[in-house]
């Protein structure tokens, strides 16, 4: 009899494996991505002090007032630009990318590319 794992269970196991190798510092925080069905969230986290330095999501008023749909690549790209702008404003340009166990494709890749174009280095 084989056990059946949900996609989210498999993603969480991948994320635990990735987190063993990746951690953020004050000089080079971790850019963590979480994707839900209707929104995408990104945070810059300093793991040494367990603090979120910068965050952005499709639920931010700055993105909502632009009228961009939240569950697609355009919304993810808008979040990438916004988090990069907020990070550069705080003087953070070098980050470590944590895809959260998701495949680097679609919305996750769109967020990463937009963040790179807006000034983040990873």
Image: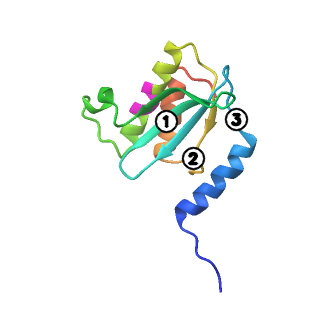
Q: Pick the residue in front: 84 or 55.
A: 55
The residue located at (60%, 62%) in the rendering is 10
Tell me the SS state at disc 1.
strand
**Which residue is denoted by mark 2 in the rendering?**
104
Tell me the SS state at disc 3.
loop
Of the two numbered discs 1 and 2 in the rendering, the one whose residue sits closer to the viewer: 1
- The Cα–Cα distance between marks 3 and 1, rounded to whole angstroms, is 15 Å
Residue 20: where, in percent of width, then height?
Answer: 74, 45
> Badge 2: few (under 14), some or many (20 or more) residues near its Cα, within 10 Å?
few
In the picture, the quarter occupied by the C terminus is top right
Q: Main secondary structure of the magenta part?
A: helix
**Which residue is denoted by mark 1 in the rendering?**
42
Tell me the SS state at disc 2.
loop
Of the two numbered discs 2 and 3 in the rendering, the one whose residue sits closer to the viewer: 3
**Which residue is denoted by mark 3 in the rendering?**
23
- Asked where in the image residue 45 lies, by quadrant, the reply is top right
Q: Earlier in the sequence, mark 3 or mark 1?
A: 3
On whether residue 80 falls in the magenta region, the answer is yes
Residue 7: where, in percent of width, then height?
Answer: 53, 63
Q: Earlier in the sequence, mark 1 or mark 2?
A: 1
The residue located at (66%, 21%) in the rendering is 26
Residue 59: where, in percent of width, then height?
Answer: 34, 36
Q: Is residue 118 visible?
A: no
Q: Which residues are magenta?
A: 78-82
Q: Pick the residue in front: 65 or 115.
A: 65
Q: Is residue 3 visible?
A: yes
On whether residue 24 falls in the magenta region, the answer is no
> Badge 3: few (under 14), some or many (20 or more) residues near its Cα, within 10 Å?
some
Q: Pick the residue in front: 102 or 105.
A: 102
């Amino acid at each position: 009899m084989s056990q059946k794992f949900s996609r989210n269970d498999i993603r969480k196991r991948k994320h635990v494996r990735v987190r063993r190798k990746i951690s953020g510092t004050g000089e080079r925080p971790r850019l963590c991505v979480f994707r839900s069905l209707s929104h995408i969230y990104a945070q810059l986290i300093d793991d040494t002090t367990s603090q979120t330095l910068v965050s952005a999501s499709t639920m931010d008023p700055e993105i909502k007032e632009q009228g961009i749909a939240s569950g697609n690549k355009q919304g993810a790209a808008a979040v990438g630009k916004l988090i990069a702008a907020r990070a550069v404003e705080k003087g953070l340009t070098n980050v470590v990318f944590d895809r959260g166990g998701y495949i680097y494709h679609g919305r996750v890749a769109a967020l990463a590319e937009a963040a790179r174009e807006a000034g983040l280095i990873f």
